[in-house]
Image (tube, rainbow, N blue to C red):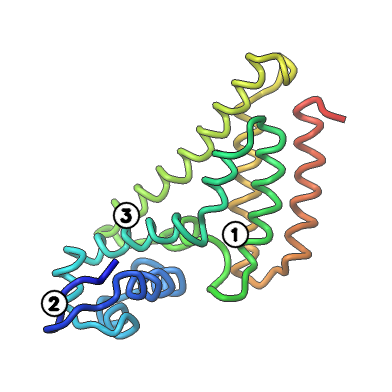
Amino acid sequence: MAGVRGQGRKFDLDGALEKAMLAFWRHGYDGASVATLTREMGINPPSLYAAFGSKEGLFFAAVEYYNNGRGSFMQRAFDEEGHSPALIRRLLYEAADTYTLTDGPGGCLIIGSATRVSDAAQEVADRLRDLRNANIDRLEDHIRADIDAGTLPAHTDARAVAEFTGVVVQGMSHRARDGATTEALRAVAGTAWKSIRMLLGET
């Protein structure tokens, strides 16, 4: 994309979104002030508002940029894995690898950027919560499809397995932000996978 007109010139949109993403990821939604964002993006406030409409508009543009880049492992896993056991295993191990990359703040932008917000930003937190819950719902749907197809036991508690996976993945994000290593989180993924295999009736 050529860029967005601002400050009498064009600025690179992807470059600006990369910097905004990192600022929101590092400081959180409330902690990333407009002054911080414009300084780190290298633009002025009128350019920000002209390009994105508002701080919230910039944030969700950064979330989309994240989901199309660093956070895309989850969407790819859902798209590419045909059966839920393989999907769950892949989500666990790729979360461990992705959340501990050293070229960012660590963890997951969507999990960690709006856990505590002001009343004015509650809608932002609610939208991120809905994104997280949608992934758990989607995983449950995959598990139920395997149950219906007879590839998983009929007694499998699809919701419990999906919730457990979500709790582990979200917990790994927080541990990565606190400095946990890839090796440590892959060990967590392995332990969780052993438990989930039992829940799915696998040996």
Q: Nearer the viewer, mark 3 or mark 2?
A: 2
List the residue tagged with mark 2.
46
Give the farthest residue toward the right: 203
Q: Earlier in the sequence, mark 3 or mark 2?
A: 2
SS for callout 1? helix
Q: Which mark is residue 124?
A: 3
112 or 146: which is nearer to us?
Answer: 146
Picture coordinates of residue 40 (x, y %)? 34, 83
Q: Residue at x 29, y 51 (%)?
A: 123
Q: Is residue 173 above or below residue 18?
A: above
Q: In the rendered structure, which amino acid carries the disc numbered 3?
A: Val
Q: Residue at x 66, y 38 (%)?
A: 87
| The C terminus sits in image quarter | top right
Picture coordinates of residue 17 (x, y %)? 35, 69
List the residue tagged with mark 1.
173
Q: Earlier in the sequence, mark 2 or mark 1?
A: 2
Q: Earlier in the sequence, mark 3 or mark 1?
A: 3
Left/right of residue 195 with respect to residue 72 in the rendered view: right
Give the farthest residue toward the front: 2
Q: In the rendered structure, which amino acid carries the disc numbered 1?
A: Ser
Disc 2/disc 1 C-alpha distance (Å): 34 Å
